[in-house]
Amino acid sequence: MRLSEVVKSISYLKANAANLIEEINKGQKTFVITQNGEAKVIVQDIKVYEKTQETLAMLKLLAMTRDRSKEAKGIPKTFTDLRSELKSIQ
C-alpha cells in the first residue's frame, strides 16, 4: 500500500464522497483520511473490514487455544465448538 495513493484529506472526502466510495468498493481499498494534516480515520470497503474481523476472531481463538493448552485444559475439537467459544467472548 502506497501512502501517497491512499491518504486523502477530509476536504477531499467531503468534495468527492460518492467517487471515493465507488473507488473503495470497486477495488476493495482502504483510505486514510486526514484532518489538519493528521491521520484521523480509515474508510474501508465493507468486505475488507469483515474479512479483517474474521481474521481477528480466528487469531483470538488460536490465542485462547494456546492458553488453554498451556493450562492443560480441553481444547475445542470442532468448528462448532470454536464458533460457540467465539460467540461467548463477543
Image (spheres, rainbow, N blue to C red):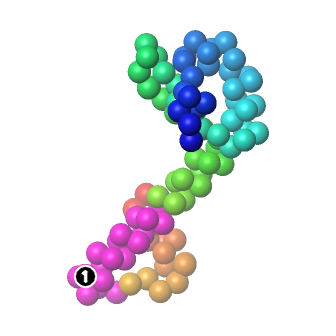
Residue tagged by mark 1? 70
Asked if one can make out residue 88 in the rendered structure from this viewpoint, the answer is no
Q: In the image, residue 58 lies at what x, y percent?
A: 48, 66
Residue at the image position 74 percent from the left and 24 percent from the top: 19
In the rendered image, which quarter is residue 28 located in?
top right
**Of the pair 6 and 72, the residue shown nearer to us:** 6
Residue at the image position 62 percent from the left and 19 percent from the top: 13
Residue at the image position 29 percent from the left and 75 percent from the top: 67
> Is 61 part of what is drawn in magenta?
yes
- The vertical placement of 69 against 31, above or below, is below
- The vertical placement of 56 against 61, above or below, is above
In the rendered image, which quarter is residue 46 located in?
top right
Q: Is 52 displayed left or right of 36 in the figure?
A: right
Total residue callouts: 1
Image: magenta residue range: 57-74
Q: In the image, residue 55 lies at what x, y percent?
A: 52, 60
**Of the pair 17 and 38, the residue shown nearer to us:** 38
> Is 58 part of what is drawn in magenta?
yes
What secondary structure characterizes most of the magenta part?
helix
Dot 1: element: helix
Of the residues shown, which amino acid type is indicated by label 1?
Lys
Q: Quadrant of the N terminus?
A: top right
- The vertical placement of 85 against 24, above or below, is below
